[in-house]
Image: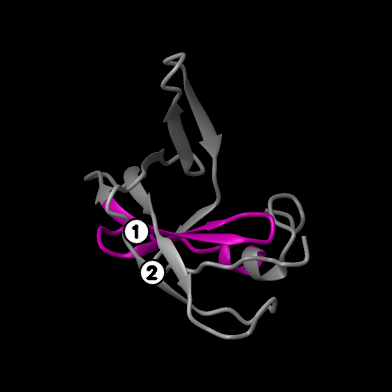
Amino acid sequence: MKLGTETGSLMNHLKSNNPTPPVVGEGATELMWTDRKAYFVNWVSDDKKECILERAIAHRIDNNGMSESQSYRYSRSGNPMELKFRWNAWREFYTCPYTGKTKNIKKNIVFGYMDEYFDFSF
């Protein structure tokens, strides 16, 4: 991946080269342009090519305000939203409840850790 094609952050680019497979009970992180979202891994297929992730509720625990230095504690929702992913550059398979059509959306997901980050500069 060339820097700047899928992420606008050097940190996200460096973290994206993580070949760790998904493991139930461990975390996952979606690397976005500059932000990151944390997930729980709830299910993994035997061949490790499909998984179900649950968006973590991220509670900010530092007092750093609008800074780059951010710390979070993660918890689960009482009514979780689970997302199904298949390996092919990790694509989320989303079925619209109104039309019934399924779309696959490419996401940059890395496994083995949870790391929430909000870029206040955007």
Front in this rendered view, residue 45 or 37? 37
Front in this rendered view, residue 37 or 48? 37
Front of the two marks 1 and 2: 2
Boundaries of the magenta span: 13-42
**In the picture, residue 97 is in which quadrant?**
top left
- Badge number at residue 11: none
Query: For mark 2, does the 10 Å Cα neighbourhood hold few (<14), some (14 to 19), or many (20 or more) residues?
Result: some
Q: Quadrant of the C terminus?
A: bottom right
Q: Is residue 8 left or right of residue 64?
A: right
Query: For mark 1, does the 10 Å Cα neighbourhood hold few (<14), some (14 to 19), or many (20 or more) residues?
Result: many
* Residue 49 spot, x, y in % from top left: 34, 43
Q: Is residue 107 left or right of residue 51?
A: right
- Badge number at residue 74: 2
Q: What amino acid type is highlighted by mark number 1?
A: Phe
Instruction: Please say if the residues under marks 1 and 2 sit with CB atoms less than 8 Å apart.
Output: yes
Q: What amino acid type is highlighted by mark number 2?
A: Tyr
The relative height of residue 101 versus residue 21 in the rendered view (above or below) is: above
